[in-house]
Structure formats: structure tokens, C-alpha cells
Image (cartoon, rainbow, N blue to C red):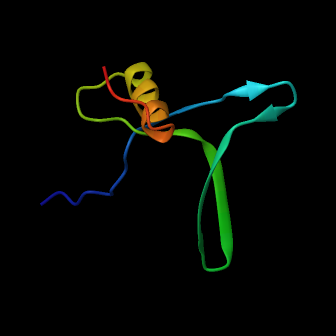
């Protein structure tokens, strides 16, 4: 029997303006606040470019095409 390790492919993008980058803040866990570039999990059969476009639209509440 094969056990899943729970790995998921993600696609992230760096959105930069001058010396700043856009990051997403995640809830505190065990006293640690986490930040990461905008993006998320790649859905089955989706390429990374499409995934990051979809994820950014979701984060800024834009409708899907």
C-alpha cells in the first residue's frame, strides 16, 4: 500500500512595485505569522501559468473568464 505524503504543487507570482512586493498574510499559528507571495495550489490538469492567474483573480475577487 502506498501512503500519500500530502505534497501539492503550487504556483506563486511576485508582484513588484519599486522596492516593494505584494505578499499574502496567513493567520498566526503557534505564535508565528506567515507571509508568502500571492498564488496557490495548481488544480489537476492545470498548467502553472493558468493556476497563478486564477489564484491572483481569486485573491482580488475578480470573476473567472
Towards the viewer: 27 or 3: 27
As displayed, is residue 38 above or below residue 27?
above
Residue 20: name its quadrant. Answer: top right
Nearest the viewer among 11 and 6 is 11
Residue at horizontal 25 percent and vertical 57 percent from the top = 4
Residue 18, x across and y down, in percent: 86, 24
54 vs 60, left or right, is left
Could you tell whether 60 is left or right of 15 in the image? left
* x then y, percent, for residue 35: 66, 53
Q: Quadrant of residue 48?
A: top left
Q: Which quarter of the image is occupied by the C terminus?
A: top left
Residue at the right extreme, as displayed: 19
Where's the N terminus, which quadrant? bottom left
In this picture, is 22 found above or below 52? below
The residue depicted at 49 percent of the width and 32 percent of the height is 56
In this rendering, position of residue 22 left or right of residue 11: right
Please give the name of the residue rendered at 49% of the width and 40% of the height, measured from the top-left corner: 59
Q: Residue at x 46, y 28 (%)?
A: 52
Amino acid at each position: 500500500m502506498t501512503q500519500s505524503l500530502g505534497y501539492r504543487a503550487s504556483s506563486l507570482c511576485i508582484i513588484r512595485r519599486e522596492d516593494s512586493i505584494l505578499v499574502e498574510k496567513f493567520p498566526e499559528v503557534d505564535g508565528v505569522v506567515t507571509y508568502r507571495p500571492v498564488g496557490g495550489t495548481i488544480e489537476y490538469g492545470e498548467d502553472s501559468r493558468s493556476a497563478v492567474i486564477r489564484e491572483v483573480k481569486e485573491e482580488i475577487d475578480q470573476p473567472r473568464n
